[in-house]
Every structure is written in structure tokens, then in C-alpha cells.
Image: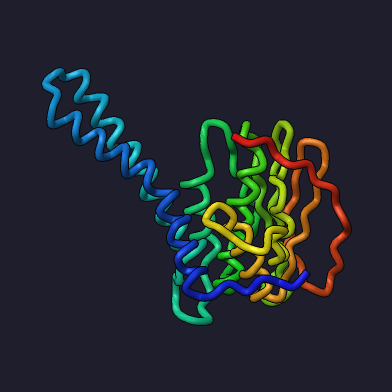
Amino acid sequence: MTTLALDPMDLAALLCSRVCHDVISPVGAIVNGLEVLEDEDDPSMRDVAIDLIKKSARSASARLQFCRLAFGAAGSVGASIDTGDAESVARGLLTTEKTTLNWTATRQLMAKNKVKLLLNLCLLANTTIPRGGVLTVDAIGEGDAVELLVTARGPNAKVAAGVVDLLDGRPESGKVDAHSIQPYFAGLVARECGLSVVVTLEPDTLILSAKPSAVEKDPVELEAAPSV
């Protein structure tokens, strides 16, 4: 199957839709909280509204900071990014009551696109453990030789149907929409870096590794995740 090449305008539009999807929920919650403040005189309800606004504002900020590095043009062309910044935005977005982020990658300056890929692998891995668990992030080596590794461990870790094809740039349907743009984009960035993403599924564990494209990927049978 031929690799799908999206029109640049379509790619930009789909990524914008993805970012809007990520931030619309906390922004909507902020609006709801402000409406409560306008209409309520009960001190307890006003306290609840203020707490909702604070939590939602932090969530919106974390999502925007993550998207800026994962999808945006942070830094100039050819720039390197401190992986400490990547760790910071990943912790802000991915560390929750259900999920723990274990960032073991050594802090270093890394090519911008490789940092974008690493964050996209984190985002993708997080979707494979909807019940929560542990995300472990590592980068082996430095410079052009670096390999990226993101491991998701949690009950019934699964990858959604079609994700492997999307990472390879060959969606089974022959098209990409706002729901599937993220894994497609991750694969696109990987190829720009001269890497390919290998998916390995083990009991309660899913491993995403980005290695030089010359490395052949072993076939893997993946069970589709149930619809949520």
C-alpha cells in the first residue's frame, strides 16, 4: 500500500482540529465556572466555581504547552530542544490520579523533530492504558544515533485498530480524519527523522520504540481496543 501524502492544508486543518478538541473541554469548564460566579450568591457554590476555574485553567495551560511542543513549531528551523522542557510538559499533561509518568531519559539537547516524536509517542501510549498505569519514557544514545522508547504498563493495555497502519502512513481506509491524525502525524515526524516506529504488545504492556528505518519491524498481532 502506498504511503498517504496529505495536502499541507489538510494536515494543518486536521492538527488544528486536534488541538481544539484537546482544549475545548477545560475552556468550556472555565466558562461554566464564570457563569456560576455571576449568578450565585451562595459562598459555598462560589468556592466550588472558583476551584473549577483554577483546575480547568491549569488543565488548559498544560494541554496548550504540550501541544506547542508536540504539534507546533517551537524553536527555529533545525533547532534543538531541551528534553527537560519535554519532560515538564509531559508531566503537566500525563501525570494524573490514574497514571504515573516515569521519565528516565537523560536530559540533553535533542533535535526538534525527535522531541516532537517523543511527545507524540507519549500521547499515543497514554491512550493504550485507559484504566491507568505507568508510562516509562527513555532515550537511548545521543544525537543522530538516539533511539526513543515509550512503554505503557496497565491493565489490558491495548492499541486501537488501525494505529499501526497510521504510524506507517498507510491508513486502511486510505484517508485520515481529526480522530486519527495524531498517530498519522507521529509516523510522519518519525520518517522525517529517519526513524520508524515499532509496536510491541506484551501482557498488560505496550512498547513504542522509534529506531532507524533500516531496522525491520517484526509482525505483531494487535487486539483492537474497545470503543469508549
Q: Residue at x 55, y 58 (%)?
A: 177
Q: Which residue is depicted at the point 69% across and 44% down?
A: 152
12 displayed left or right of 131: left
Q: Nearer the viewer, residue 21 or 141?
A: 21
Corner quadrant of residue 19? bottom left
Horizontal side of residue 1 vs 126, given as left or right: right
Image coloring type: rainbow
**Vertical comparison of 216 with 44: above or below:** below
Q: Quadrant of residue 45?
A: top left
Q: Residue furthest front?
A: 173
| Residue under the point 52% across and 56% down | 178
Q: Is residue 69 above or below residue 124?
A: below
Outermost residue toward the bottom in this view: 77
At which x and y percent is residue 187?
Answer: 66, 65
> Can the viewer see residue 166?
no
Image quadrant where one finds the C terminus: top right
Q: Is residue 128 visible?
A: yes
Residue 22, horizontal then vertical, whole percent? 44, 49
Write the residue at 59% across / 61% down: 176
With 92 as the anchor, is 129 left or right in this view?
A: right
> In front: 211, or 158?
158
Give the answer, above or below, for where 215 lies relative to 139. below
**Residue 84 placement (x, y as % from top left):** 52, 59
Which quadrant would the N terminus be assigned to in this image?
bottom right
Number of marks in the rendered image: 0
127 lies left or right of 33: right
Q: Position of residue 155 (x, y in %)?
A: 71, 31
